[in-house]
Image (tube, rainbow, N blue to C red):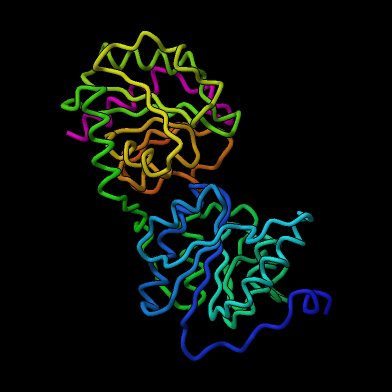
Amino acid sequence: MTKRLLFGWPRPPAREIRRILVIRRNGIGDMICALPVLRALKKAHPTARLTVLADDANAPVARCCEAVDEVLVFPLRRRLFTGRTWQAWRTARDLKKRRFDLAVGISGSFSRLLAQMVYGTGAGIRAGTLSPDRIVDPFYYSHYRVRYEGSRTHQILTGAEILQSIDIECDPGAIDLPLPSAEIDGAKSWLKSHLDATRPVVWLHLSNRRPESRWPTARYKELVSKLVEKTDVSVILARTAGDPDFEPSFFEPLPRGRAAWFEDDSFLKFAAALGLAQIAVCGDGGVMHLAAAVRTRVVALFSSTEPEIWRPWGASHVVLRRGEDVNLISVDEVFSAVVQCLKSNV
């Protein structure tokens, strides 16, 4: 009863779905894994208005998706009180005014905060993920998939299962990220002015927000040298804007026309440049998923994250993992993986 008093009572299911809300927060990779869900919802309800509630970090991904009509950023209003339950209540209260007919919360496991916001929208149809102990009294969701302990379901398939609970099928491979032609043209111009554009491009993304997934700077430097000396590729070194752990000066001098440094805090410019590479070497995280979404083949360096749940989607990518420490992955292993990808791309 307390939860109902706090978040209200949902409306009866609508006869026609006119307004849809999808909540997918956290990072870039999370939203990319949700793209098949967004496209499937729009296909199932082409005349409905599709709204996405995102975070600052992953909102640019949702804005690139042609299926999305509107992107909102959590929290909808900045307030003095920032407790999680308070933010969820305020957000749900504002969302309820929009009278969504269908609300979908995407998460690999049960999240109370997410469930509260989905329920608080008042939507008659509410879909999400529950843990087994909540099946007896689902409360928050009218439709749900169950996440059992030890599940290794990929995040993309998790979203597909949530939609299956409301009888909608989706294509797990629908992760392509369309980018403005102007950004693509700008990236091509940058490439021609910095590197030999006739060579295959290998992108090395140095940054990673997980300390255990940050491959050492010295190994990236050694990898650059091997790629330049033993292959015919051009190399792009990139980092998250301003990352102090990877300074350009450490890699100097770079061989002119064969290796260059790229850094830009514009999501669109970054994604467009990444899309010009044939292969991207990076730790597990958002850039890994972004590369897959712009159809760049990935050599992913995994640490503690489970590849079964978070690997880049697609059969052509390579996952390297040696225990839960990325430092156990050698330069020779990464170099060999890149060379094999280059051969198979021919």
Which x, y percent locates residue 296?
Answer: 31, 40
Q: Quadrant of the N terminus?
A: bottom right
**Which SS does the magenta portion mostly show?**
helix
Q: Residue at x 30, y 43 (%)?
A: 183
- For residue 70, side relative to residue 23 (left or right): left
What is the span of residues highlighted in magenta in the rendered image?
321-346
For the view shown, which residue lies furthest in the top direction? 253
The residue at 46%/82% (across/down) is: 18
Residue 134 in which image quadrant: bottom right
Say whether residue 282 is left or right of residue 195. right
Number of labels in the image equals 0
Please indicate whether residue 85 sits to the left or right of residue 38 in the image. Answer: right
Closer to the camera, 159 or 119?
119
Q: Nearer the viewer, residue 149 or 238?
A: 238
Residue 180 at x, y = what percent? 30, 50
Foreground of the two, 314 or 223? 223
Which percent across, then down, holds residue 153?
51, 55
Residue lying at the far bottom in this picture: please name it: 15
Snapshot quadrant of residue 342: top left
Q: Is residue 232 magenta?
A: no
Quadrant of the frame with the C terminus = top left
Q: Is residue 344 on the magenta stretch?
A: yes
Image side of residue 204 versus residue 19, left or right: left
Residue at 45%, 51% in the rendered image? 60
Taking the view exactly as shown, the residue that stands out farthest to the right is 2
Residue 159 x, y percent position in the rendering: 49, 62
